[in-house]
Amino acid sequence: MEGTLFPNKPVYSIPKNRPPQPNPPLKFSSAKLPTPPPTSTNLSFHFDSLLQHLLHLSSPPNSTAHKLNDTKFCSSLKISDVSAQKQRNPISVLEFEVDEGEGVSNNDSLDYLSRKGKLILDSIMEQPLHSLSSFFDSCKYELLHVDLISLLKALDYFGNWEKALSLFEWTVLNLGTANEKVDNQAIELMARILGRESQHSIASKLFDVIPLDDYLLDVRAYTTILHTYSRTGKYKRAIEIFEKMTESGLSPTLVTYNVMLDVYGKMGRSWNKILGLLDEMRSRGLEFDEFTCSTVISACGREGLLNEAKDFFTGLKSHGYVPGTVTYNALLQVFGKAGIYSEVLTILKEMEDNNCPPDAVTYNELVAAYVRAGFHEEGASVIDAMTCKGIMPNAVTYTTVINAYGRSGEMDKALMLFDQMKELGCVPNVCTYNAILGMLAKKSRSEEMLKILCDMKLNGCAPNRITWNTMLAMCGNKGMEKYVNRFLQEMKICGFEPDKDTFNTLISAYGRCGSDIDAAKMLEEMIKAGFTPCVTTYNALLNALARRGDWRVAESVILDMKSKGFKPNETSYSLMLHSYAKGGNVKGIERIEKDIYSGNIFPSWMLLRTLVLANFKCRSLMGTERAFKALQKYGYKPDLVLFNSMLSIFTKNKMYKRAHEMLHLIHESGLQPDLFTYNSLMDMYARGGDCWKSEEILRMLQTAGGKPDLVSYNTVIKAFCRRGLMQEAIRILSEMTSIGIGPCIFTYNTFITGYAAQGMFTEINEVISYMIEHDCRPNELTYKIVVDGYCKAKQYKEAMDFVSKIKNIDDSFGDGSVQRLASRVRNNLES
């Protein structure tokens, strides 16, 4: 290892003739401090620019989004924004052939409507949606005595499902006041209409109001309603309806069972229920299809049930089932989500052997598997492999890798891939843009965010709610509540009403701003808006608590989650680890660590990575090593952040050989050292007393095109001061200030420590004067170093004189601190 740190890079060679000692010697005051950097007055300007660009790009969602009927029953229902895109073009009543004598639509397809029904249909078609409620009230008698089902069918036929829904709601409300019930067939028809239009949110609210227990519907309608509740996350309600359906004697179809498998899979902790349904399906003679198999396997993936997924898949094949691409893709996702890329490769090999053709989803899952295990470059290489096989990578493929680069801090690679994607003709979608904006926002690179918004405009890609949520998340820093409020206000003006994800983002953003009151208010508003808190909501709270290290409150959040039936996921536990680390609670980290290593919590790449970082933050060498070895044991690939953490903790514990091993691993993994790597190396040599080697690393950083920061220079200054080479330390200080980096309290205290060790008290006074002159007040540690220096030199009287004059030098220094220093001198004198 001697003489070569990075085999692929030349070692900066220090001149044999080291810099000559200046004559006369340099004085500390010779270092000219740079002009203070301008204050960040441009923050407001950048946010205003981003907001203006976003407002310009955003247009209010389609005007068909509205509230139906101004009543308690109907005001809770809103037409989804998607409705305008999905509905068929309505045919105007003016386009019909009209018998002028009768004024009734003459269309053979409406033979099932009575003459009176056709007249009412024409009138409804002429009415704008917002005025239907008053129109229905004006002809209440006629509407309650017409064939509702035929009228609903006719409205649906002409693509007016919204008007059909409005009529249905009005009828239910008015029949209810007369203690009558709407017909079963009308409910079945509305279930089919809303199901076909994918209006799951509206349908779930509608069927929450209608007392379904009082009706006996057909299997098709029940299946549609079950699917609605599954899509809206109302799993318990779906189970209740399914049980009522089977108790009534109706036999579920294959589709019904598939929907219920999906319900239990999404609900979680229901593996035994899933197995029970599969047994029931077999007993009824129903054969599993691709949806059945893929749904069961996906359920395993959500819970991390890897063995169960594998056993189920093996059992299918043993009974003669031939898996298709969809089933294989589901299995790929299970192991890809866990980051076990080796198993993913085995599944792909089996697909090839069985002549099962991979599709774009297959390759996307392969990419996801690589990046989740830390193999970002391997994930990126799949893009080329897809092209060679004639399958064009899509926006999902690129976005997956871009996201991975962003999470690992490799911003430049992410942006390069984004440019490559466009050059190869793959048009970014809004998800791609959101991913880029999100990673730029985390680094506050607002100018580049403006360019991305301009690029969105050029490509005709309109921002969506997630784009706005990304901007809200960017404002989640201390003192930036006003920006959160402003972006939220403008978001609403643009027609984007907050959804569940928006509320979760707001809770997290306000929490990170330190505004617990606003975060709690958002939670209340979320519930008032009809959204049920989920695991993501709890994670938003945990995120804010993790930043503060408030692990006690974080523990209460986890307990509340569990008491309400929510299962903490890997993000929840990862945030708990961060809370414990920030709060210095090593025992808390060890409790979660024990559950991970025992298998009670699945050891994902994210959790093991967080475990390394949490132990590192608490300076737990054994814990950090254990977590790093576990990560390697499971076949995961460490990223540069993990390597740097290991390098740093070995350095701090003077385990230089192990630190060098980490350095080799960085190179062997194909990673390039970053600023943190170089700073750790400087620190390693500084602690080992090799000040010249520490400076060599500084020069290597500069040669490689890197920019040293304050930590870099402070470390090299510390190295020279420890060896008593104060002139060299001043030389480095002068270089530092000449490039615009000003010293901090650590820099000054380092110099004072170096001078005190040599009894150079005149120079110490010079440093202290220099500090005060440049608005850096000495702290208690500063004066403690000086006092200890006098005591070490047995100059106790001088020490007391120094303490007595501190208030003259620095009148802001506290009396209590002065007394502690005087006591320290007396204790040294008596010992």
Image: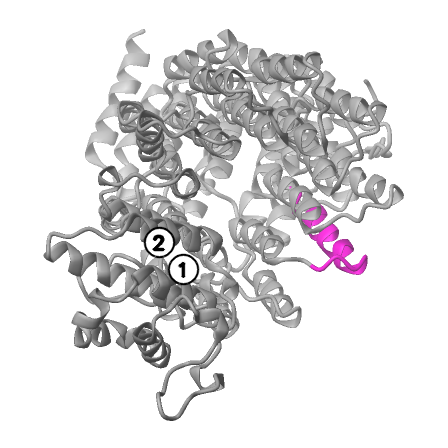
Amino acid marked by disc 2: Ile
Which residue is drawn at the image coordinates 43% and 31% (left, top)? 263
Q: Quarter of the image containing the N terminus?
A: top right
Q: CA distance from mark 2 to mark 1?
A: 8 Å
Image coordinates for residue 383, horizontal then vertical, percent: 79, 43
Mark 2 packing: few (<14 Cα in 10 Å), some, or many (20+)?
many
Residue pictured at 20% horizontal, 34% vertical = 815
Magenta-colored span: 410-427
- Badge 1 crowding class, 10 Å Cα cut-off, few under 14, some 14 to 19, many 20 or more, is some
Q: Kindly give the residue lying farthest to the left in the view shown.
A: 178
Q: Is residue 100 magenta?
A: no
Looking at this view, is 531 or 78 the one in front? 78
Q: Helix or strand or loop: what does disc 2 sit on?
A: helix
Q: Which mark is residue 141?
A: none
Q: Is residue 605 left or right of residue 155?
A: right
- N-term-proximal mark, 2 vs 1: 1
Q: Position of residue 545 (x, y in %)?
A: 34, 34
Residue toward you, 293 or 251: 251
Judge by depth and name the residue closer to the eye, 603 or 336.
Answer: 336
Asked if residue 422 lies in the magenta stretch, the reply is yes
Q: Residue under label 2, please give it.
A: 202
Residue 80: mark in rendering: 1
Give the side of residue 573 with respect to residue 724, left or right: left
Choose top left, top right, bottom left or bottom right for residue 721. top right
Quadrant into which the C terminus falls: top left
In the figure, 43 relative to 130: above or below? above
User: Mostly what secondary structure, the magenta segment?
Assistant: helix
